[in-house]
Image (tube, rainbow, N blue to C red):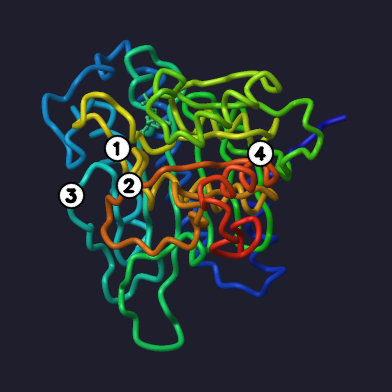
Amino acid sequence: MLHFEQTFMDFLLEHQERHHRTYHFLILMNSILNAAKRIQYYYLTGALHGNLGMAGSVNVQGEDVMKMDDIANEVVKHYLERSGRVIHAVSEEEENIIPMNVEGGRYFFYYDPMDGTSNVPHNLPVGFLFGIGKRNLDGPEDNHLRAGNEFRAAGMFVIPTGTFTLALRDAGCWRFHIDEMMNYVKPVRMVLPEDRKTWELSFNTANREYYAAGIQEWIRNNEKSFVFRYLGALAGDFHRILRNGGLFMYPAIVNHPVAKKNRPQGKLRLMYEAAVVAFMCCEAGGSAVDESGKSILDIVPEMPHQRTALYLGSKPLVEEIAGILRGGKGPASAPGGCR
Ligand code: F6P
């Protein structure tokens, strides 16, 4: 008996029709899938073609750019432009907002085309993360940078593993796997497990002495209850948390003896890293807060490359941490930090 898995495009088509939506979003998603497959190809063959090294330049974040950063960014831009649906994009790799179809576009696109680049020289998993906002169709568009709670969708590809996870506003978080024909297939709804026995902790433990005192204390009191897993690529680490539950964190660095190594604003980028995974996590029943215990989704970006601390995962753990960070004050936003 032949067996056919449902493809991502069939899944999305059904979703759009069920909700009486236009096909614009489908066209955008098709271009994103094309981009991801092309990045996947360049990454899989990267070692053979000499693409896993440095590009020789420094990006807006002051980090050394790798060849794969440049390749992935060019690939994504190409397909976004071809879709004709994007007003402007924000890329981790570019200092300025990238204008696209400024008049006729419908969506804002925020992306990190190659997340977790310390894994690149080893050909280990990296991510392509993105968040999607929508033009104001009811009135004049002010082009403001969208907060996570204004996203319509957010997703991540884990490359070259071949998984794609997409959260659709108020419609859940769904995981797909790439098949032999390079189609993403077999939607599985992701819901963070309530049973604590699979929960994991994920953070760069080399930094733990530099976290705020309350976070250090929480780690000391709780670490024995969990297993540790840390890949060093947000997409991969969050991929595990989505299935197993637990807590991923990249806290602010506030107690480093070398003052300039402190990162009171956190390390991760709000628009195309933290808000993306926070949106997905909320659609899967979890939540996410920053160093003040505020919901990540409520932070309105003041600039494209703004950084934030991030605590992300199963609601009870994030709520516990948020309570510590708020210093006993009540929730700064909706319970659980979601809409
Ligand atoms: O911001 C990029 C990133 O590589 C994330 O994907 C990852 O979670 C984090 O930085 C890893 O940082 P570190 O190497 O400091 O643990």
Amino acid tagged 2: Arg
Label 2 to label 4, Cα distance in Å? 34 Å
The answer to whether residue 176 is left or right of residue 159 is right
Q: Secondary structure at mark 1?
A: loop
Please identify, in this view, whether the residue under mark 3 or under mark 4 is nearer the observer: 3
Q: Residue at x 55, y 48 (%)?
A: 288
Task: Tell me which numbered mark, 3 or 4, is placed earlier along the sequence.
Answer: 3
User: Which residue is disc 1 drawn over?
Assistant: 263
First along the sequence among labels 1 and 4: 4
Q: Residue furthest right?
A: 1
Looking at this view, is 281 or 221 the one in front?
221
Decide which of tag 1 and tag 2 comes sooner along the chain: 1
Which of labels 2 and 4 is toward the front? 2
User: CB atoms at circles 1 and 2 under 8 Å apart?
Assistant: yes
Residue drawn at x 20%, y 47% is: 94
Label annotation for residue 185: 4
Residue nearer the viewer, 78 or 325: 325
Three-letter amino acid code at disc 1?
A: Arg
